[in-house]
Image: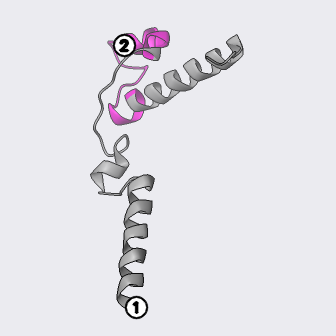
Amino acid sequence: MKNRSSSYYRYQRKRAINRKLRIIKYAWGVDETDAIVHPYMKHPGKLSKAKLNCSCKMCKHEKYYNIPKPNVKSKTDLMQWDIKQYFTE
């Protein structure tokens, strides 16, 4: 296990919380000015371990638009190159 400082863990926790807050605000449409405030908006620290399970276009961009993952794309490119080399020989 790596020896990391507490500032590293604070930074990662804050980054995860801010990402999930953006999902709640912009994808779910929750605002601080609503009559009933969402519990996560009151206490954003709960978002550090919360699972939002969002499948909107913003969160699952690659899946929604059928964009292959980088490792899959590199493998298919390599296979295409091998096929091209096979037929040119």
Q: Left or right: 10 with respect to 87?
A: right
Q: Is residue 13 above or below residue 26?
A: above
Q: Mark 2 highlights which residue? A: 37
Q: Left or right: 42 with respect to 34?
A: right
Q: Secondary structure at mark 2?
A: loop
**x and y percent of residue 74 in the render?**
44, 61
Residue type, label 1: Thr
Kindly identify the residue that appears in the image at 29 percent across and 40 percent down: 56
- Crowdedness of circle 1 by 10 Å Cα count: few (<14), some, many (20+)? few
The magenta stretch spans residue 52 = no
Kindly identify the residue that appears in the image at 42 percent across and 83 percent down: 85
**x and y percent of residue 65 in the render?**
30, 56
- Crowdedness of circle 2 by 10 Å Cα count: few (<14), some, many (20+)? few
**x and y percent of residue 57 in the render?**
32, 46
Q: Give the extent of the magenta segment.
A: 24-47
Q: Is residue 28 above or below residue 40?
A: below
Q: Left or right: 62 with respect to 22?
A: left
**x and y percent of residue 45 in the render?**
49, 11
The magenta stretch spans residue 38 = yes
Numbered disc in front, either 1 or 2: 1
Residue type, label 2: Val
Q: Quadrant of residue 3?
A: top right
The numbered mark at residue 88 is 1
Mark sitting earlier along the chain (1/2): 2
Number of residue marks: 2
Kindly identify the residue that appears in the image at 46 percent across and 31 percent down: 22
Quarter of the figure with the N terminus? top right
Observer-nearest residue: 33 or 56? Answer: 56
Q: Is residue 63 above or below residue 41?
A: below
Which residue is the extreme one toward the front? 89
What separation in Å lies between label 1 and label 2 (alpha carbons)?
A: 65 Å
Q: Secondary structure at mark 1?
A: helix
